[in-house]
Image (cartoon, rainbow, N blue to C red):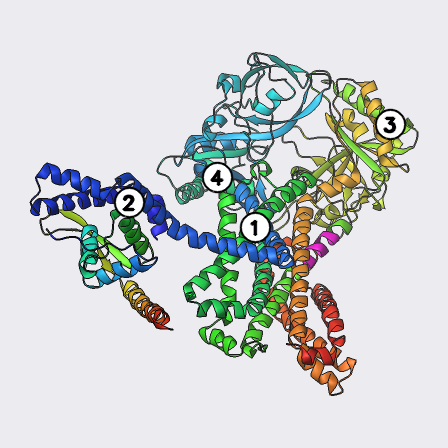
Amino acid sequence: MTVPPPRTALLQGTLDLLILKALNLGALHGLGVSRRVEAITRGTFLVKPGSLFPALHRMEEAGWLVASWGSSENNRRARYYKLTAAGRRQFESEVSQWERIAMAISLALQAN
Amino acid sequence: MSLFKNLFARSRVERDLDQELRAYVELLVEEKVKQGMAPDDARRAARVEAGALEHIKDEVRDVRRGAVMESTWQDVRYGMRLLRRSPGFATLAVITIGLGIGANSAIFSVINGVVRKPLAYPASDRLMFITSQFPTLNFSKFWISPPEYFEFKEHTRTFSEVAAYTTGAMNLSEGERPERVNAAFITANMFDVLGVKPVRGQAFTTQQDLPNADPVVVISHELWQGSLGGDPNIVGRLLQIQGQASTVVGVMPPGFDLHDARAHLWMPLGLDPALRTNRGSHFLYLVGRMAPGSSAEGASAELAGMLRQWREWAVTGHAPNDSTHRLQMAPLQDEVVGNVKRALWVLQGAVLLVLLIACANVANLLLARAESRHREFAVRTALGAGRTRILRQFMVEGTVLSVLGAALGLGLAYWGLKYLLALNPDSIPRATEITLDPVVLAFTVGVALTTGLVFGLAPLLHLGEQAVTQSIRDGSARTTATVSRNRVRRGLVIGEIALAVMLVIGAGLLIRTFRNLTTVDAGFASEGRITFGVVLPQATYNEPGRRSQFITGLVSRLQEIPGVERASGMTGLPPLRQVNANDTDFEGYQPKEGDPPANVDYYQTATVGYFETMGIRMRDGRGFEPTDVTGSPVVVINEALAKRFYKDQNPIGRRLRVDGGPTNSPWFTIVGIARDVKQGGLENPAGTELYFVFEQGAQVGFVPNQMNLVVQTSRPVTSLMPAIRSTVTAMDPTLPIVQMRTMDDVVGDSLVRQRFLTQLLGIFAGVALLLAAIGTYGILAYMVSERQREIGIRMALGAGTSQVVQMVLRQGVMIAGIGIVVGIAGALALARFITTLLYGVSPFDPVTFLTVSTVIAVVAVFACLVPMRRATRVDPLTSIRAD
């Protein structure tokens, strides 16, 4: 057993970005999204179902995601989410926005 | 889309969500088992990790509902806030739309109730109305005689049942005051044909419908609940009808009627099926229910076949045939609605034009606003609002306006219709069926949404992408409106004026028609005259002598009332009465091929002094004189009759008699020719008419039991009414006085439908004119404010007031001029729809066209005045410096 890495609270607005990033790599079901976010952030962020599902449904409603029923590796029925074209565009614009913010913040912190 | 999914497929969405969360937990368990946990522990751990599932579901539901509702609601709130911020604009827009939608809902509710709704009988589309036609006599819709009815009933295969009826009115002596009640006399099978059963008691039996059966009556629900006080033991009760005790056997359901007869008493016709004589006595209307499987075409074909062979069934020569005595059928509904249909569609067309004008106005207002909101939208686009989002906001704003307008419009429609129908009772058939029912509400909502979308989209006409970037680039500098943008606005106003011109011309033509009808020479004087009717019941006035005595007594007593100058009695009340079409034997007249048949449209039996009392002038010879009372039988003819039967001869001194088959009347000598009196409606040419002397009735064997009395006075007419009433009551307290009215009202009432149509179209045309004026004003005011700088510069360069005025006026005149020309072209194109509604005026009447054009031009110039003044007040310094 390894010691779990410190968990960080999600910054407002970053959840969407992380979910979009996770799905940009391929369609996933709810738990899959949660696990992939965990993996790509090296365990920094753990997405709880209480925030995961509302976010997924909100993004579906916004037209960024589409959902369909499929079966998991063990033949279990699960609802899979996939990025739409609009979702991809949204992802790109959020990425560039995030980069601007991140750069601005780090510049700010480095300033004397 | 997803809003619909959420609203209408809620259970599926719920099931999906439930399954999704359950799958999540299962996957979690699986994962933990794979990591080496015992299944039970894994399940417990998964539960804990997943948290409260119901809570998650709630959150998801909130998110789902919120997404759509929120952005729409945001738009609505934003729209409302904007409207609140410019209350003047909002009020103007809502009133404009309200007028447009109100007019449409009002007329549509009339069409819905009168034309569209099927008659209130089961399978009413299977009911046909059967009448006769006499082409050579110019009767396009006439009655059918009893033998013809029985023969038709026996031989038809396409109808499962045929019933006959006629209408009239009866004296009902119940309660404290005797009253005159509309009645329908029907064959026993009528209720079966219509498919309606009494709600209490029974319909008539065939036995009760035989001649000389004990008198029975079925009454209307309204009579039962009204004059009869809702008597619970009504069935079996005896009513005094026309002085005769009749047993109530049934009560019809509320609202039950037949062909707008407004009948409250339903009585058996009492025809004798065995009696096949008197074939010329046409007085029945027929209603048939088509047999299952037969079609209207089949029925018409059968009828044509019957007409060819009818002569074999007839005992005498008189039989329906396809040259002079046809039968025809039409769906009962068409028959009831009749010619009001065209008028209603004309009105619906008119209100549609009003709505279009209203829409154009509001679109123009929104355009002007969109221009001033240019920067707002540019900023919002730059901040990331999508084009669809901005578009949606326009539509939501438009819809908010039109929904508010629709609410106002429904109110206007409801109260307006109520008021107008109260002013014009009897102006349209089936008036009681006019309501704001769900169909009308759906119509209104549909119109509101459509208009909302239409003018919500109007601002998009010029809000292209480049417009957005441009106005940002321009910064605060005022952009001059592009040429194309102005063309749209001007086009809208020109369209408005054109539509208004069309409407006002239509209204003008109808107003002229109405004027023509009210000033048409009816052949008699109506001013200062009062009339009422009396019907002498068979029971007490069986003796012709008693009837004659009563009427002459009444006339002389009426003449004794102070203030009364003359009084007389007559059988038929002009200017709108039912045709008699009596066969008449003109001595020496033998109709050859092509000659008119010896038949007279109207018989009038009047007391001595009648022509003087009614102000009917004589063209030749004399009227009735006191010496005629005991003298030999005389008759007066009218000009139309003289022209038809005595072409180049002098009719005075010639003789004629009533053609009564075996029992001819004595010969009457023609003593005078009276000027024509309109009897078949003011819009129709006068028919042929014969005047008989009432006082000679006993001598010639005909004393009518039903008379109209007319009283002439120089005093205010209404002041005499109480005295007249008490005179009648003093002579016979059981006698109801039928419809005491001024003769002016009688003439007015005969025009009630035309008046209603004219009033409505007049109102709509007025609204259209007002809206078009507002539109013209709006665009000119806008133009002036937009060109303020230009005007300022011109003035600074030395342009005088008159040049500025000219500039504005030129714009106004151009817009109005084009609008008028287009409108006239439109009016010419639409003229044929209104032709049948006109009287004495051509649909291309130059006077109307010229007057309307002038009025519109004057209104347009007035609309220019305020902007013009504002333009001359432009201060060159401030306007150049502005911005």
Specify whether disc 3 shares its chain with disc 2. Answer: yes
Between the residue at mark 4 and the residue at mark 2, the CA separation in whole angstroms equals: 42 Å
Residue at 26% across, 62% down:
A84
> Mark 2 is on which residue type?
Val
> Mark 1 is on which residue type?
Leu
Number of the front mark, 3 or 4: 4
Q: Chain of mark 3?
A: B
Q: Chain of mark 2?
A: B
Q: Secondary structure at mark 1?
A: helix
Say which residue label 2 marks: B13
Say which residue label 4 marks: B118
- In magenta, the rendered stretch is B506-516
Q: Secondary structure at mark 2?
A: helix
Mark 4 burial class by Cα count in 10 Å: few <14, some 14-19, many 20+: some
Mark 3 burial class by Cα count in 10 Å: few <14, some 14-19, many 20+: many
> Mark 3 is on which residue type?
Leu
Specify whether disc 4 shares its chain with disc 2. Answer: yes
Q: Quadrant of residue B764?
A: bottom right
Q: Is residue B631 shown left or right of residue A60?
A: right
User: Do the CB atoms of the residues marked 2 and 1 lie less than 8 Å apart?
Assistant: no
Number of the front mark, 2 or 1: 2
Say which residue label 1 marks: B404
